[in-house]
């Protein structure tokens, strides 16, 4: 099965080549970079918004990127049911553009945090999580300054109810708690999916844990899930 | 010629030039310089740019070897790593800016070294930050520490270049003069190496990146003087960093270089347009003509003096063939950058500056870039050494060892630096196979089996007590840190941080440390390919410890054979390869002495360089054969800290702890040995290794063939660190500590912010 991925490059994206590497060299699927000035992304089966500091993120993370030409294309693509995966800065951009609900505050420690965390997979039914088991605990790295997810109460209830939470920061045994939360995110939320199930945003970096030499392979299954979805 | 203002009274003094240097300028020019020209001389003839006091001494360092593709004198050194690939790397200091404005000082330090690597044609792949501060519980030091770390985090993370290593050490002498050294490494193909040369008269001079503002004027002059009470007022001399612009500049320049449009390229760092133009022209033996009105500026009405001396960040100078300027312009536009033709290369040998076509400065490029005087200042052995070196270590009492263990492990210099490096993105680019917290950084080279291994080291306290030994230790320590991973050390860059070289005692420290470093580099076969000297690290006559820092690069032929720093198999044998510590002199300059007795004393011995060379060999060959389960070198905190850190395991999880291991060992102190010196002695060439018992015969043979002692201490066992001493037939327990308790202390000892 061949699935064509597009990795969007904003000025300031810096995980674009990491995602590209995993898709091409580890997953073995065709992949292109998509320049931020392009407006039509319909030729791809999955669009990835990678991590980094789009436009420097001197304002609020993702606040400028949402106005870029490519995001008009991505919004249209998502509305047509296309698969969109936002990782870290990509997640922040999806929030800013309204494709996913909620917003990011600076981490509660007020510092950048880089390191490994434990995640529980709460919804294994999305096109991005098919290769996981529900309730499974996996390890992935995070690296961000603004990952403190917030959402107002009513929408949060709705999100929970419809299985919109896909990844939760937990301890080794799968329990969420203050100790296992690296950034203060509400309900330890690390990743969410939209109602239709085609747009997923996550703070952890699956592309950084897709090869054993980097300390783990739990992230590869995010990309494998997309391929399986089309199979 | 129009001169901006006449040279009144003695303006050169204001700019940091000495009277005799001014006379030399007048003599060589054959006339008095105008104000703009004087400013240009002042910055390029500053200690920071011209190495006036260090140049003669630096010639002692070995710079040649079969792997050296580019040695000192270019923007960065380049070493061959086989298969047509090479590494470009260099270390620099940003000490003075950090002393007055730690956040921007550190941020722009990162930016500068990244552009040096970029200028060689390499994609910058990794950053390392050796830092020194005063005690972290001192408010001023804590402010500087926090500011520098945030500045590195802000700039490096945004660039998407992982910060994968470095060290942080603390001592009162760095209170007013923190050290912020920054090293960058990039990978490139041999046929992609660029030079900072303005060759080919008629070629265009272009500036790409940020516009030029009034920031950082005379930054390098400021970096060439002692700090004083009014140094806070120099804050406007510190540049302001824009990492987003730098990220665009990296991508754009790499793209431009790939098109074949770029003939020469140079970073605009210290002394901005003046230095980049003068240096590129001088290297090529050409001249250059610049029209300052063509330089994109941030503000109206900037004078030629301001434009030429601005240290605005994120700018590169490009030499481009006339027909290729549109290609460069097109790529710059794509990345949203300014690119402007500001002049052309000439064959006159002069750097000519014009404003609206009217000449405002004309100086021979070679005179500016290479004509500064070289000094051989007087040196004399510091008086303090008489006191420190005859200190009687034998007379010290031995404190309760478990208490000492906790004290040493919680010393800020030994304690876990996770509070620092978890603020750095050390994983981006997905090449970090071993990152901060693991001794040396191991980076994979995608598309090959190779690994590049880097460690930065420098021990100010030891260098203070014995400068020659300190210079050697910096090289030996970094070589061993690289070799314990299984990598072969192949070359170094350095950053030499000292006080005022006009003080004969400081200069003596400098000469001795460089001599030691040169000797060690020769013995270990690791040439030096470039680096940086930072003098005048003193405030009101108080100098820092002489602190030579080395950045060692090593090469792993097969990254799968890398050796972990952590114990990983219960029952493995634990042994010391190399010198077994124990003599009182091994405590000289140790963390233990300072932490438990408040003492900085003794005379640390020079490392046995032959032994060090053989130990490197044993580590590399043993790793190739897969003999070791783990290996770590003996440094701060001695064997005890090495055992403890090998037992702690990685601390890269943000929200959980990896399981710990432990070791049960027995030591047999020799005659004249002290138990504390066995456990905490640092001044030894040694590594603590673990391996399956079945490998013991082969390792014993390997050690013997290299004339290295191999001392079996005990085994990897459980979650405790237990040390027994055998004295004759008697065995007594010296220490029995739960690893977890020791790790908790180690993890929590250092608090940032």
Image (spheres, coloured by chain):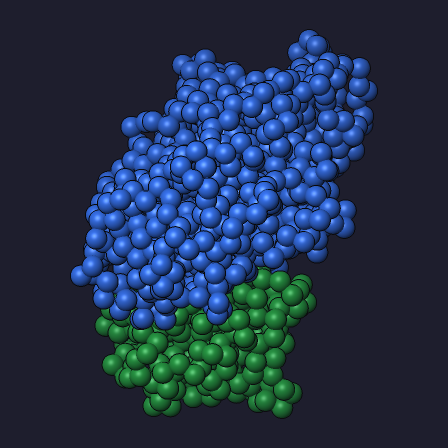
Q: Position of residue A7 (x, y in %)?
A: 33, 71
Q: Return the residue nearer the eye: B253 or B419.
A: B253
Q: Position of residue B626 (x, y in %)?
A: 39, 32
Q: Residue at x 53, y 59 (%)?
A: B215
Task: Tell me the quarter of the picture where residue B655 sits.
Answer: bottom right
- Residue B692 is left or right of residue B102, and the answer is left
- Residue B29 is left or right of residue B96, and the answer is left
Q: Position of residue A85 (x, y in %)?
A: 40, 76
Let me know if residue B57 appears in the view.
yes
The chain in blue: B
Name the quadrant of the C terminus of chain B. bottom right
- Residue B13 is left or right of residue B707, and the answer is right
Q: Residue at x 38, y 90 (%)?
A: A79
Task: Tell me the quarter of the picture where residue B72 sits.
Answer: top left
- Residue B432 is left or right of residue A24, and the answer is right
Task: Tell me the quarter of the picture where residue B466 sits.
Answer: top right
Q: Residue at x 45, y 13 (%)?
A: B707
Q: Return the residue nearer the eye: A93 or B569.
A: A93
Q: Residue at x 57, y 71 (%)?
A: A147
Is residue B505 positioned above or below A121 on the image? above
Is residue B361 positioned above or below B462 on the image? below
Q: Position of residue B552 (x, y in %)?
A: 45, 35
Let me know if residue B722 appears in the view.
no
Q: How many marks on residues? A: 0
Task: Tell me the shade of chain A.
Answer: green
């Amino acid at each position: 099965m061949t699935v064509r991925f597009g990795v969007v490059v904003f000025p300031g994206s810096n995980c674009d080549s990491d995602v590209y590497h995993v898709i091409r060299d580890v997953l073995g699927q065709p992949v292109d970079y998509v320049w931020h000035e392009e407006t039509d992304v319909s030729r791809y089966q999955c669009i990835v918004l990678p991590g980094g500091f789009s436009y420097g993120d001197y304002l609020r993370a993702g606040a400028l990127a949402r106005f870029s030409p490519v995001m008009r294309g991505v919004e249209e693509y998502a509305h047509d049911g296309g698969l969109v995966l936002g990782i870290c800065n990509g997640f922040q951009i999806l929030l800013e553009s309204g494709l996913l609900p909620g917003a990011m505050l600076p981490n509660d420690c007020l510092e950048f945090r880089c390191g490994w965390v434990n995640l529980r997979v709460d919804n294994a039914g999305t096109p991005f999580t098919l290769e996981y088991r529900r309730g499974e605990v996996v390890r992935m790295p995070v690296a961000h300054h603004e990952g403190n997810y917030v959402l107002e109460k009513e929408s949060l209830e709705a999100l929970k109810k419809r299985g919109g939470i896909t990844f939760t920061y937990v301890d080794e045994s799968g329990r969420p708690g203050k100790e296992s939360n690296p950034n203060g995110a509400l309900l330890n939320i690390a990743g969410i999916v939209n109602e239709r199930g085609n747009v997923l945003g996550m703070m952890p970096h699956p592309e950084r844990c897709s090869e054993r030499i980097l300390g783990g392979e739990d992230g590869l299954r995010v990309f494998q899930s997309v391929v399986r979805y089309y199979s | 010629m129009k001169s901006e203002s006449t040279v009144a009274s003695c303006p050169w003094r204001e700019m940091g030039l000495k009277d005799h240097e001014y006379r030399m300028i007048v003599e060589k020019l054959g006339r008095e310089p105008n104000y703009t020209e004087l400013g240009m001389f002042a910055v390029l003839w500053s200690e920071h740019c011209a190495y006036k006091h260090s140049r003669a001494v630096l010639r002692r360092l070995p710079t040649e070897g079969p792997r050296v593709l580019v040695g000192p004198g270019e923007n960065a050194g380049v070493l061959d790593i086989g298969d047509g690939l090479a590494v470009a790397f260099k270390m620099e200091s940003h000490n003075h800016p950090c002393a007055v404005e730690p956040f921007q000082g550190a941020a722009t330090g990162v930016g500068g070294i990244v552009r040096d690597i970029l200028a060689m044609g390499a994609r910058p792949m990794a950053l390392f930050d050796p830092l020194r501060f005063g005690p972290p519980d001192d408010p001023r030091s804590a402010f500087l520490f926090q500011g520098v770390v945030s500045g590195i985090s802000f700039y490096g993370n945004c660039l998407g270049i992982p910060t994968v290593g470095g060290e942080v050490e603390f001592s009162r002498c760095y209170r007013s003069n923190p050290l912020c050294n920054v090293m960058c490494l990039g990978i490139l193909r041999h046929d992609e190496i660029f030079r900072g040369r303005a060759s080919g008269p008629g070629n265009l001079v272009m500036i790409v990146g940020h516009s030029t503002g009034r920031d950082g004027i005379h930054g390098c002059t400021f970096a060439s003087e002692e700090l004083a009470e009014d140094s806070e007022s120099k804050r406007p001399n510190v540049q302001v960093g824009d990492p987003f612009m730098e990220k665009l500049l990296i991508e754009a320049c790499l793209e431009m270089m790939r098109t074949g449009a770029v003939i020469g390229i140079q970073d605009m760092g210290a002394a901005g347009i003046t230095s980049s133009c003068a240096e590129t022209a001088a290297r090529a033996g050409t001249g250059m003509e610049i029209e300052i009105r063509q330089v994109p500026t941030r503000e109206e009405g900037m004078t030629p003096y301001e434009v030429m001396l601005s240290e605005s960040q994120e700018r590169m100078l490009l030499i481009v063939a006339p027909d290729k300027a549109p290609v460069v312009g097109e790529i710059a536009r794509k990345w949203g950058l300014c690119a402007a033709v500001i002049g052309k290369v000439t064959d006159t040998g002069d750097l000519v500056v014009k404003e609206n076509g009217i000449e405002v400065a004309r100086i021979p490029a070679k005179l500016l870039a290479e004509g500064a005087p070289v000094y051989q200042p007087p040196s004399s052995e510091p008086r303090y050494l008489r006191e420190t070196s005859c200190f009687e270590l034998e007379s010290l009492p031995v404190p309760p060892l478990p208490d000492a263990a906790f004290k040493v492990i919680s010393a800020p210099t030994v304690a876990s630096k996770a509070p620092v490096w978890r603020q750095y993105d050390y994983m981006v680019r997905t090449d970090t196979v071993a990152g901060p917290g693991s001794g040396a950084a191991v980076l994979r080279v995608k598309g090959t089996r190779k690994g590049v291994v880097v460690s930065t080291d420098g021990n100010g306290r030891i260098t203070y007590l014995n400068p020659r030994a300190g210079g050697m230790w910096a090289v030996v320590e970094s070589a061993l840190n690289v070799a314990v991973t299984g990598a072969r050390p192949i070359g170094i860059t350095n950053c030499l941080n000292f006080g005022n070289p006009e003080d004969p005692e400081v200069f003596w420290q400098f000469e001795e440390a460089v001599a030691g470093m040169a000797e060690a580099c020769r013995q270990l076969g690791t040439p030096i390919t470039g680096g940086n000297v930072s003098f005048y690290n003193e405030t009101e006559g108080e100098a820092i410890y002489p602190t030579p820092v080395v950045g060692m690069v090593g090469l792993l032929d097969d990254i799968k054979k890398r050796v972990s720093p952590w114990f990983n198999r219960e029952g493995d044998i634990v042994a010391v390869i190399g010198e077994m510590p124990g003599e009182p002199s091994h405590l000289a300059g140790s963390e233990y002495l300072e932490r438990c007795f408040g003492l900085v004393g003794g005379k640390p011995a020079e490392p046995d360089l032959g032994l060090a060379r053989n130990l490197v060999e044993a580590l590399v060959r043993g790793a190739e054969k897969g003999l070791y389960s783990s290996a770590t070198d003996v440094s701060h905190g001695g064997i005890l800290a090495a055992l403890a850190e090998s037992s702690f395991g990685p601390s890269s999880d943000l929200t959980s702890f990896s399981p710990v291991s432990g070791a049960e060992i027995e030591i047999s102190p020799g005659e004249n040995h002290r138990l504390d010196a066995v456990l905490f002695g640092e001044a030894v060439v040694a590594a603590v290794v673990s391996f399956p018992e079945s490998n013991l015969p082969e390792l014993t043979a390997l050690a013997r063939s290299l004339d290295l002692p191999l001392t079996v201490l005990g085994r990897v066992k459980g979650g405790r660190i237990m040390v027994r001493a055998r004295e004759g037939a008697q065995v007594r327990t010296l220490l029995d500590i739960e690893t977890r308790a020791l790790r908790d202390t180690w993890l929590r000892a250092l608090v940032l912010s």
